[in-house]
Amino acid sequence: DFEARSTACASELKSFCSTVEPGRNRLLGCLMSHGPDALHKPVTADASSSMLGDECRRSVLAYRQELAAHPLTMNIAMRLSCAADVPKLCAGVGAGNGTLGEGEDELRVKQCLIAHKSALSTGCRQAILAVQIAGASSIELEPLTMRACASDL
């Protein structure tokens, strides 16, 4: 959860998110609503339109990159929503037993779920869509694309 690492955003959390109940990345969502450029602008870009300080923007981006690289262990909504879909649709993917693996295995399982989107449960389909939307907002949030295109970037 982002809340455990939010020290870089202490002043922003106090200013913008003091009424938000911590947990399930609600504080992260609050910060993103006050600094959407944390998703779209590189950290080195001009942050004059952001309400978030540079250190907080870097922290938000780093955490979102971790979420993207570990979609099943770190993304609570996806983990819970897709728990039944993974063994049913992606049993031969990742660790080979359909369990929610880590790192590369997780990215393969995510790709498998995307490939079977029409067969997913409603909750899993919604969680996958949210992950895809986040990835579309910034190439930095798509680890496989970043790796495949590294020489072109």
Image (tube, grey):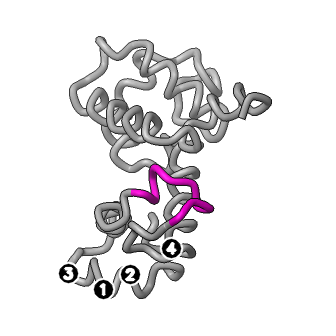
Q: Which residue is mark 2?
A: 12
Mark 4 to mark 3: distance in Å?
19 Å
The image quadrant that residue 137 belongs to is: top left
Mark 1 to mark 3: distance in Å?
10 Å
Which span is picked out in magenta?
A: 37-46
Q: Secondary structure at mark 1?
A: helix
Percent from the top left, x then y, of residue 111? 51, 22
Percent from the top left, x then y, of residue 95? 64, 27
Q: Please, what is the three-letter code of the amino acid marked with disc 3?
A: Thr
Cβ atoms at labels 2 and 4 below 8 Å apart: yes
Is 11 located above or below residue 51 in the figure? below
Q: Secondary structure at mark 3?
A: loop
Q: Magenta stretch: dominant SS?
A: loop
- The circle on residue 19 is 3
Mark 2 to mark 4: distance in Å?
8 Å
Q: Please, what is the three-letter code of the amino acid marked with disc 1?
A: Ser
In this rendering, the label closer to the viewer, 4 or 3? 4
Q: The C terminus lies in which quarter of the figure?
A: top right
Q: Which residue is mark 4?
A: 56
Mark 1 to mark 2: distance in Å?
5 Å
Cβ atoms at labels 1 and 2 below 8 Å apart: yes
